[in-house]
Image (cartoon, grey):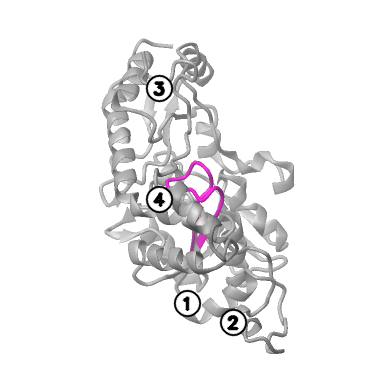
């Protein structure tokens, strides 16, 4: 039997809240600051120290907030074409609708489920304002190729790194490579702040503008001087992080190396258990120039409904989690030029991967799958 509680079975996700997080949050609740204050600034600095050497970090209320700000800073506006992955959380693409941009969906690479570089090359044109990539499940995209296309066209490359905290590409940390990167600290990510996000920016000249945009367009430092030095000249948003969330983030950041290592160990165990099984293929293996962050364990499975039913009968959760975004009416509806997405649409399946699991849980899942479906 699996090691997780029998009444729950092996659940798909489970939040990772460090033991010392309660004490850290309690300190904040007893302090003067519970909104955006010194803990937010500390979280930003410690995040930079841990993951960044070139980019700077600004903490916000969600990964979606960070994406919206990145798109604004990239100069995306009404009618601008933006190339995006069709397979991602809708949060990647919904903020482009806020701006009136024209979404151009790129197909998936069937080996990784990341954005397909060859299709990006076909889509890019004189109207393209930006390219957006998502490191699906935590495996980095083909960053050299994407960056090369962006450079040739003199447009920004923006990476949605919501899955990929701790991932590396050719020895460089994801979040430090592109013009703009975003991270998510939503409930079930590697680091959770309940909800929250981080925007990383390469151009330091944009930092003060970004600080204004995340706080109604107000220059907070001028406001705190106590006199009229803080006129609002641009539309801003309420996108700041608060100190309660930042305290959670700092607690998780302190033990991040252990978190990432354990998730990678579970992923490696899946690779071992699923090797050689007919009708199933683990996504994200066999790529040697990048390090997987192991947020999701995704397989391509023949007869997916049958496998899901088999797993459910043994009290093991599984799900698609994300869906092709052209299924949604708000994003324009079904496209006909995405053959790879069509090919994998009925096959991909996410298996449990989180810190409440033990290696024996993965062995158990492997044993169930090996018995057939």
| Residue drawn at (48%, 48%) of the image | 192
| Residue drawn at (67%, 77%) of the image | 218
| Element at label 4 | helix
Q: Quadrant of residue 363?
A: top left
Across and down, in percent, residue 262 comes to 30, 39
Q: Earlier in the sequence, mark 3 or mark 2?
A: 3
| Residue ID for mark 1 | 203
Please say whether residue 184 is one of the residues in the magenta stretch.
Answer: yes
| Residue ID for mark 3 | 4
| Residue drawn at (49%, 51%) of the image | 162
Instruction: Please tell me whether mark 4 or mark 1 is closer to you in this view.
Output: 4
Q: Which mark is residue 221?
A: 2
Front residue of 348 and 228:
228
| Residue drawn at (33%, 45%) of the image | 260
Crowd tier of the residue under label 4, counting other residues whose Cα lies within 10 Å: few below 14, some 14–19, many 20 or above = many
Q: Earlier in the sequence, mark 4 or mark 1?
A: 1
| Residue ID for mark 4 | 252
């Amino acid at each position: 039997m699996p090691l997780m509680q029998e009444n729950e079975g092996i659940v798909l996700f489970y939040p990772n809240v460090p033991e010392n997080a309660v004490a850290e949050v309690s300190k904040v609740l007893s302090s003067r600051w519970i909104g955006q204050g010194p803990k937010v600034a500390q979280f930003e600095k410690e995040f930079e120290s841990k993951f960044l050497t070139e980019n700077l970090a600004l903490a916000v209320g969600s990964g979606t907030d960070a994406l919206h700000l990145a798109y604004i800073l990239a100069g995306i506006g009404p009618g601008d074409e933006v190339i995006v992955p069709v397979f991602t959380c809708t949060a990647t693409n919904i903020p482009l609708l806020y701006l009136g941009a024209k979404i151009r969906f790129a197909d998936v690479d069937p080996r990784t489920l990341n954005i397909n570089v060859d299709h990006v090359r076909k889509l890019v044109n004189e109207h393209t304002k930006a390219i957006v990539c998502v490191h699906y499940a935590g495996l980095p995209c083909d960053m050299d190729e994407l960056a090369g296309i962006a450079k040739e066209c003199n447009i920004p490359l923006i990476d949605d790194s919501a899955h990929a905290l701790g991932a590396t590409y050719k020895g460089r940390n994801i979040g430090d490579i592109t013009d703009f990167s975003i991270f998510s600290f939503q409930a079930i990510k590697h680091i959770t702040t309940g909800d929250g996000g981080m925007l990383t920016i390469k151009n330091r000249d944009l930092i003060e503008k970004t600080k204004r945009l995340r706080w109604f367009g107000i220059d907070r430092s001028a406001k705190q001087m106590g006199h009229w030095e803080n006129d609002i000249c641009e539309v801003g948003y309420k996108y700041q992080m608060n100190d309660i969330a930042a305290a959670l983030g700092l607690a998780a950041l302190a033990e991040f190396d252990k978190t990432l290592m354990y998730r990678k160990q579970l992923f490696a165990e899946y690779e071992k258990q699923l090797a050689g099984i007919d009708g199933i293929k683990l996504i994200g293996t066999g790529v040697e120039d990048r390090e997987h962050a192991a947020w999701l364990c995704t397989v391509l499975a023949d007869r997916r409904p049958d496998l899901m039913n088999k797993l459910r009968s043994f009290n093991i959760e599984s799900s698609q989690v994300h869906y092709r975004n052209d299924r949604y009416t708000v994003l324009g509806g079904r496209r006909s030029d995405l053959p790879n997405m069509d090919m994998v649409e009925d096959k991909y399946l996410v298996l449990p991967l989180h810190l409440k699991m033990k290696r024996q849980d993965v062995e158990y899942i492997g044993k169930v799958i090996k018995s057939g479906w």
